[in-house]
Amino acid sequence: MTGNALDGDAAGGMERHTYDVVVVGAGGAGLRAAIAAHDAGAKVAVVCKSLLGKAHTVMAEGGIAAAMGNRWPEDNWEVHFRDTMRGGKMLNNWRMAQLHAQEAPERVMELEDWGALFDRTDDGLISQRDFGGHKYARLAHVGDRTGLEMIRTLQQRTVELGIDVFMECTVTDLFKDGDAIAGCFAYWRESGRFIVFDAPTVILATGGIGKSFKVTSNSWEYTGDGHALAMRAGASLINMEFIQFHPTGMVWPPSVKGLLVTESVRGDGGILKNSEGKRFMFDYIPDFFKAETADTVEEADAWYEDKKNNRRPPELLPRDEVARAINSEIKAGRGTPHGGIYLDIASRRTPEFIKKRLPSMYHQFKELADVDITSEPMEIGPTCHYVMGGVEVNADTQESSVTGLYAVGECSGGMHGSNRLGGNSLGDLLVFGKRAGDAATAYANGLGANRPKVSDADVAAAQASALAPFEVEGGENPYSIQTDLQQSMNDLVGIIRDGSELEQSLVAIEGFKERAKTMKVEGHRQYNPGWHLAIDLRNMLIVSESIAKAALARQESRGGHTRNDYPKTDPVWGTKNLVVTLNAAGTGVDLAEKPLPVMPEELTKYFDAAAKPEEGKN
């Protein structure tokens, strides 16, 4: 079944469906997991909050990072692995980073086999472009619409395989039988009618948490649903203090503030300038990267002419470095009239090149901001884009600490450490989506007749919880709480943090939680966006508290976490992750430290001062 037809067992006015695997989310990770589960023999359902194909994956415009060696034969998985670990400041789950680097090329070729139309090199291979933090040009791309092509391909295959899709359907609770997943509870957004899914496995692929912040590239769906569902089921989250503020979001006009400007603009030659016309990124190159980065404007310009000089311009430093530099320029009073800085590709490339390589960006600025990027610079600034933290999972299977519960994509944690390299998101979706689908099916098939069962009491409790906002007398509008939460997170838990402000944020969140207890929803269940937001807000509050509490505890600056009061990276903090769980009362967040998994010696050698991966071996 595809769509939202009200079929199924309607006993008691509630639908009921039985599956082996239920995938919550229909972005790249969810669809790849569903395809893998189907191919392994499972009966699969995809449940998505919005429409099929409406996913944050389409915003990953630049490409899929994979060491295919099409442009640089020296590239291999070991180099990609090292780049990923260094970009994450060594807090990554090393096994996830290893699997991703090893398996991404095969997943890219698989997409091509399914019909993805990648750009080509002159000799017919899949083209690969440069991106921040990657030693070699390794992003397989489709202009600046790679994520869109990936979703199109996976969506088409999902439909061809006949996988059931429940669109505009929101999951509000997970069911357990003892310690194991038994299914989930959901409702149709259009009618408000409830659904029970009986399934021994649930794969969470719900994306990120950006709507907790005022300025974000994320769409309305990204309210931390998977993170919060997992916590309420008993799973833990890891690395929640690390939020990636993408360096380049639109700042004008206000209606599109935060809308993403792909890193491909910089990968294809764009440079960053302040209001004085200075190319300022040379002032912000950290010593760690100087060995592999051009040291002068002249060297950077030469890099474009001589590809054998494999040294990157400073605009292609990892995103956390670039975002902090931009933020510093703006705070120093060298920003643009609308509070950003300038991204200039017009002076570097011909109009024909820009329109061919960056068609979406050309049309986006032309139509939304009346700016012709082939002749004038763009005004851009940092925007909340991606959360490195998520559900703590087994690296090989993506299973959480709750039996039968898996998490993939942005709502899982560990792969990216403290900072995600551009292009690693799409490979992450493909590699671990397939692994989760395979593992969930193997577990479900092994249960035989001993499948966990959903209790009637749990169904009744889930229904009562969902309907609670309708029962409140004289409560507060959920929109006012959301607005205040977003402003607070933006001001107190943003790109540059301070201990006193983080403490203020936690006090504010407690206040929002109290206000949320008396949220009032008017009207009926049909077509009721206020009700939808009231349900989403519960998730946003849990996730926001997790972020703020972890950010306060980590007393250093690393990756996507910068503290004014602890500006340096502390080696002691480089040995441990922070893990958050829901407290016993279910009213707040507990936090604990956890040592990093030990990397085997055959991988640690790549990080010795004089050691490098064996280049030229794929």
Image (tube, rainbow, N blue to C red):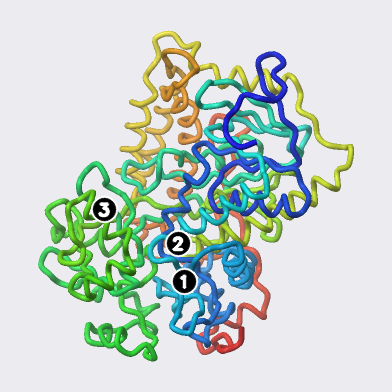
| Disc assigned to residue 139 | 1
1 and 2 marks in contact (CB < 8 Å): yes
In the image, residue 162 lies at what x, y percent? 67, 45
Foreground tag (1 vs 2): 2
Residue 193 occupies quadrant: top right
- Extreme residue toward the top, this view: 473
Foreground tag (3 vs 2): 2
Residue density around tag 2, few if under 14, some if 14–19, many if 20 or more, within 10 Å: many
Q: Is residue 88 visible?
A: no
Secondary structure under tag 3 reads strand
Residue in view at x 26 percent, y 53 percent: 250
Q: Is residue 344 left or right of residue 38?
A: left
Q: Nearer the viewer, residue 50 or 257?
A: 50
Q: Quadrant of the C terminus?
A: bottom right
Q: Is residue 400 visible?
A: yes
Q: Is residue 181 left or right of residue 448?
A: left
| Disc assigned to residue 356 | none
Residue 576 occupies quadrant: bottom right
Sequence-earlier tag: 3 or 2: 2
| Disc assigned to residue 250 | 3
Residue 100 occupies quadrant: bottom right
In the image, residue 344 lies at what x, y percent? 21, 68
Q: Nearer the viewer, residue 17 or 605?
A: 17
Question: Which residue has dot 2 on it?
Answer: 146
